[in-house]
Image (spheres, grey):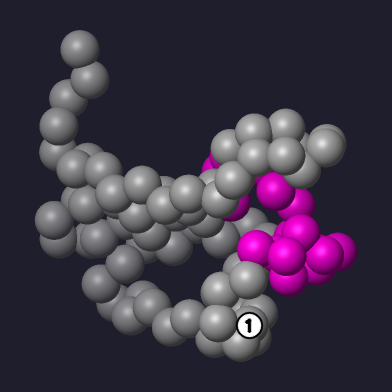
């Protein structure tokens, strides 16, 4: 299980990925878990003090499952132009 200090991080985890116990990180397990639905916005952690964002999602065709999982780290303080 992946643990996060909730006093420091705001957590968006609609599929409760953090509650699943995986041995290592195997994307095959994520694809086969009936309760986890691959999509771009699977999980997001926002640091409460620095506003840094760790965004985890699936990028590609969600029907054929021919995409990939990726984690992006974003500076939430930067303004989009």
Give coordinates of residue 8: x percent, y percent: 25, 72
Q: How many marks?
A: 1
Which stretch appears magenta?
Answer: 27-42
The residue depicted at 83 percent of the width and 37 percent of the height is 64
Task: Check the picture and name the quadrant holding the C terminus.
Answer: top left
Of residue 42 and residue 32, the one placed in the foreground of this image is 32
Q: Name the side, left or right, on which 45 lies relative to 73.
A: right
Is 71 magenta? The answer is no
Q: Disc 1 on helix, strand or loop?
A: loop
Vertical side of 35 occupied by 25: above or below: below
Other residues around mark 1 within 10 Å, as few (<14) / some (14–19) / many (≥20): few
The residue depicted at 59 percent of the width and 45 percent of the height is 68
Magenta region, mostly helix, strand or loop? Answer: loop
Give coordinates of residue 20: x percent, y percent: 65, 79
The residue depicted at 19 percent of the width and 43 percent of the height is 75
Residue identified by numbered label 1: 22
Give coordinates of residue 37: x percent, y percent: 75, 52
Task: Check the picture and name the quadrant holding the N terminus.
Answer: bottom right
Vertical side of 16 occupied by 45: above or below: above
Q: Identify the image quadrant of residue 60.
A: top right
Vertical side of 38 occupied by 10: above or below: below
Of residue 64 and residue 41, the one placed in the foreground of this image is 64
Give coordinates of residue 73: x percent, y percent: 29, 49
The residue depicted at 17 percent of the width and 25 percent of the height is 79
Of residue 7 and residue 44, the one placed in the foreground of this image is 44
Q: Name the side, left or right, on which 24 lies relative to 46.
A: right
């Amino acid at each position: 299980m992946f643990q996060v200090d909730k006093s420091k991080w705001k957590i968006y985890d609609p599929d409760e990925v953090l509650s699943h116990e995986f041995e290592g990180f195997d994307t095959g397990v994520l694809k086969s878990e009936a309760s986890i639905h691959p999509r771009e916005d699977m999980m997001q952690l926002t640091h409460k003090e620095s506003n840094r964002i760790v965004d985890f999602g699936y990028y590609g065709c969600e029907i054929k499952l021919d995409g990939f999982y990726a984690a992006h780290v974003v500076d939430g303080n930067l303004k989009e132009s």
